[in-house]
Amino acid sequence: MPRLARFALLALILPVSLSAQTPARYDTSLFRALAWRLVGPFRGGRVTAVAGVLDQPRVYYMGATGGGVWKTTDGGLTWQATADK
């Protein structure tokens, strides 16, 4: 490749690569309406199956690998063992 063609190619590619390095700017006012919330601790165990009740949106059943079937009636805030009674 001739020397002039290499220089021309470099002159075209360099501005593109430099613009890719600049961080994106965003309007911080977009985030003012957001509020931080705790989404809970990381899940400690493994779950094999989860099922919800169609006409009761806060009731779920969960099967754990350690054994047992668990039920919640408050959308997952608290769980009660149902199979180990």
Image (cartoon, rainbow, N blue to C red):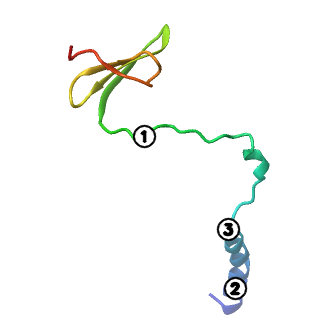
Q: Tell which of 80 and 3 is nearer to you.
A: 80
Q: Could you tell whether 39 is left or right of 49 in the image?
A: right
Using the rendered view, name the quadrant where residue 44 is placed. Answer: top left
Q: Residue at x 71, y 71 (%)?
A: 16
Residue ID for mark 3: 20
Q: Tell which of 81 and 26 is nearer to you.
A: 81
3 vs 2, front mark: 3
Q: Residues within 10 Å of mark 1 (few under 14, many from 20)?
A: few
- Element at badge 1? loop
Residue ID for mark 2: 5
Q: Could you tell whether 77 is left or right of 12 in the image?
A: left
Residue 83 in picture, x, y percent from top left: 23, 15
- Circle on res. 84: none
Q: Quadrant of the C terminus?
A: top left
Residue 1 in picture, x, y percent from top left: 62, 87
Amino acid on which disc 2 is placed: Ala
Using the rendered view, name the quadrant where residue 72 is placed. Answer: top left
Amino acid on which disc 1 is placed: Pro
Residue ID for mark 1: 41
- Confirm or deny contact between disc 3 and disc 2 (CB under 8 A): no
Q: Could you tell whether 12 is left or right of 58 in the image?
A: right
Label 3 or label 1, whichever comes before in sequence order: 3
